[in-house]
Image: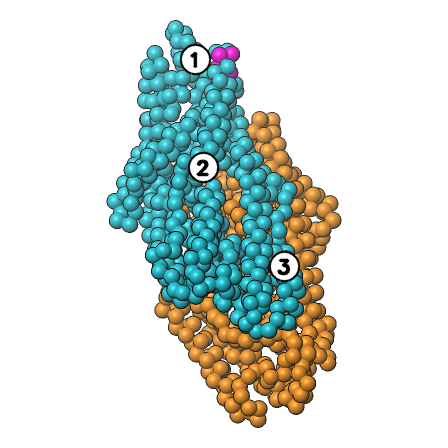
Chain colours: A orange, B cyan
Amino acid sequence: MLTTLIRRELLDNLMTFRFAAAVLIMLLLVVANTVVLIKDYENRLADYNTALKTHQQQLQEKLTYSAGKLEVDRPPNPLSIFNVGFDKRLGNEVEVSHRYVPTLWDAGSHGSTNSFMGMFASMDVVFIFEAILSLLALIFAYDALAGEYERGTLRLVLTHSVRRGYILLAKYISAMLCLLVPLLMSLLLAVILLTTSTSISLNTDDFLRIGGIILTSVVYLSVFYLIGILISVATRRTSTALMLSMFAWGFLVLVYPNMILAAIPRPEAPKARVASAYSQIEQTWEEFDRERKQFLINDAFPGEKTTFEMMASGWYNEYSYGSSSSLWYVYHSALHMKELVKDAESRVPHAQNYYGFLGPRVTDTAEKTWLIRMPALEEILVQPTNMERVWLKLSPAGLYDAATQAWAGTDLNGIRDFFEAAREYRQQVVNHYHNEKVFASRQWFAGDKDTPDWDSLPRFFFQRVDVDTNAKRALPYVSILFMINAVLFIVIFLIFVKSEV
Amino acid sequence: MIWHITKRELYDNLNSLRFALTTVLLLGLMLTNAVMHLREHPKQLQNYRDTVVRHENRLESSAADSLYKLAEQGPGRLPKKPSPLRFCAEGGETFLPDNVEGGFGRWGMDDLESFWILAYPPITPNLRNISPDVIKVDWGFIIGYVLSLVALLFTFDAISGERERGTLRLMLANSVPRHTALIGKLLGTLISITIPFALSVLLNLLVISTANDVHLSTEAWGRLGIIFLIALLYMCLFLALGLLVSARVQRSAVSLVILLLVWVVFVVSMPNTLASIVGGLSSPMSSDEFYERSWQLKRESEAEFFSRWFEEPKDSTKRIELGGAYVAKDAEAQQRLHEELLKQQISQMSRVRAVIRISPVTIVQHLLESFAGTGFERHLQFLENVQSYAQQYRTFIADTDQADPESLHIYGIRKGMSQKPVSPEAIPKFEDTLDLSKDFNTAATELALLTLFVVVLLSGAYLAFVRVEV
């Protein structure tokens, strides 16, 4: 019985103009945008490779350890083609140094970024599904029951011994099958385009992630189809159902996500919290500075010059600099002596002694201030935006966006993983410095005899989290979407069963 | 006769569900817009005033020292005046810098200090912003997206629906010329959407004008009037499109599907996709390349001057001359590099903006921006103001230096320039002006383009309706 019903519905749906239009428009938009997005990804990848090379080269040119600027770069995520998220927007290079613990807020950006071009949003594949496929789902749904009421065919069907639940189920299954056609076809084309591009290499995990995105898309689509059916069964008139569906779509997809953040006041960063955290950080560094000066007074070398009057050619700089907006503070001292003055040899041990003391102290102080900075940053900068994200998720479109970002790894967590890796790498580098006694070495400040062996440094390696973690991050949103589906289905069923034909 | 049909159409619409929904939606959006503006505008204004005060203080403190200090330090940060009509069109202002940096210490060595330049820093301001990406709800969004969708929802069944119900035959059975019927329908729907739109606009302006912090001048009210008219014109475009498709298609369901797809392609998808495609055609200097070249320039001029400079005895006129020439050349070369980068970025952006005008939503947004005094064109105007001020400032320094008989008139070094303090009143001060007439050319082109679209679609709708078989 069910199969007969499904077959009838399928034939009804497949032979319509809207089905043909849906397939055509989805293919057109997805293919056009995927080509653009792949081009964009390739450009970013090229920028990334150039940045890697330049940073390596700049490092090799440095003659001393203290002057070397070790930078790590974040590669673009190939799945950003599906949902770009934060992948393009947030910083993609950060300095790794013993002087501070790197975070997202200390990052810079490599590549050809014309800041004016930021005005144009990029249309990723998920956005097309989010906006357009949901509209198509509503167009498929609005007359599913209202049309049958109006034409009287529902009465005809119910004169047979057919359960009402079956009719509903048959309609749902067949419409979802019809909607799956444009969804899967366009995704398939996108994946084919991805695999033909030589610069993009997808591994098994990536295909699993794409599978997750497809699953989420189907669930999201089903939410909108059920919303359409609900309106259809509740209003019983096609014209009313159509109007209500269109406005429901406009509100859920177009208006709500953009309006809600404007409507809720954005919590200001608590000034007192910022000030207290920053003054604590400053105090820690001042304490460090006192110790440093005390050391210079106590050591055998007269005066407090940190170059120990050895430099014949080269450069040095030494400063403390902080910015309260991101609670950043650094004591910077870099020396790049190419040649030493003639009688410098007697002072070299003094300098080695001093820098052997200074390096570990700077590292320790940086780590001490990190313990203050980390929770404060979380509270000041991250939590207010978490609130905004929660508000956005009140619309299925927001949930869908969040879930697919989590699958693709372009959400905030995915970006922060990179900085987590950068912090781990910093620890490795510092350990290397400690083990090799780099701080107390002559190459720390002078490059006249030996130059640093940059190749012996540990290598930075960043790999995106495995697909399990992605799934774990996406799961809450996907399950909420599932729940919305179940609730909608039950409500529709109850209304339909109770309704008089 | 037209009036008759209009009235019938109007009564039909006023009682409909879509009218009620539209009213609620537009009122909600406009109220949000007003509340948001009241929250943000005072902050922007305060920010602007603070920067102006800092700019003036900097000029005063430099002037109290000497003319040299003025020439070396520069005027400081030059702020962009926020437009009071920013709620009409936000114009991507979050991606545009709100100031130009006029002078910061780049380097110093012995008695040489780097001279100020106008720096347009090539950094993205959004690098640290981790809040979710959304479109700002401004009038541009409400008109461009929501109103156009509403216009299509009002017209998709205007003709096909009547044909389905058979009322079209009834209407044409009277001696009504078809164009009269069409214009009557157009006017009727136009008025029935204008009612909720005008109501929501009035609510919006009421909320905004009752606040103490926002003052709208007579000129601003005039501009708001023009913006309202542009919105009506834009609405006509979508009404005409709706009538055209509705007349061509037999069933209203099909008509709606076609209209929605056209809307999605032209309004939602096309501007962004085209922007990416056209933007990808040219690649301006990257920030890494910029820094590399900046460093290169510095090394080149160092190589040219330093050996000669070190050889000269201290305090000799030759050494002062060389030092001054070095500083002046460095500032000029760096300034040129900054301008080159800016020019490349602007040309990329202008090309993109020219192409995406195919989409009507872009046209209306550009128009709104130019009448609200925000967005990219306005930014270009601000840059022009800044550059002409910089010219004025430099001329002032040169003239004052010429007037001092004790000065050696060697630009670029303390010993070569006038070291007398300058009266702060004499220094030109920067004030950003908002001028509509300057840029009216682009606005006029866009207005003409929009009108052209409307005319073409209207005549299309007319032709389609005339040939319709009832």
Q: Which residues are magenta?
A: B464-468
Mark 3 closeness class: few <14, some 14–19, many ≥20 residues within 10 Å: some
Residue type at the position of mark 2: Asp
State left or right for residue A179 relative to residue B88.
right
Residue position for label 1: B179
* B464 relative to A440, above or below: above
| Marks 2, 3: nearer the viewer | 3
Front label number (2 vs 1): 2
Q: What is the total number of numbered labels drawn onto the structure image? A: 3
Residue neighbourhood size for the residue with mark 2, other residues' Cα within 10 Å, grouped as few (<14), some (14–19), many (≥20): some
Q: Position of residue B173 (x, y in %)?
A: 41, 7
Q: Residue at x 50, y 86 (%)?
A: A293
Q: Is residue B137 magenta?
A: no
Mark nearer the N terminus (3 vs 1): 1
Where residue B453 appears, x then y in whole percent? 49, 25
User: How far across and how far down the image is residue A455, in percent?
Assistant: 73, 72
Q: Earlier in the sequence, mark 2 or mark 1?
A: 1
Identify residue type, mark 3.
Leu
Task: Say left or right for B403 vs B115.
Answer: left
Q: Where B107 sits versus B450, above or below?
A: below
Q: Using the image, name the chain to which the residue with label 2 belongs.
A: B
Say whether residue A218 is left or right of residue A197: left
Instruction: Inspect this view and state whether residue A390 appears.
Output: no
Which structural element holds mark 1?
helix
Disc assigned to residue B340: none
Mark 3 = which residue? B297
* Residue that badge 2 annotates: B439
Mark 1 is on which residue type? His
| Front position among marks 3 and 1 | 3
In the image as oriented, which residue stretches furthest toward the front? B405
Mark 3 chain: B
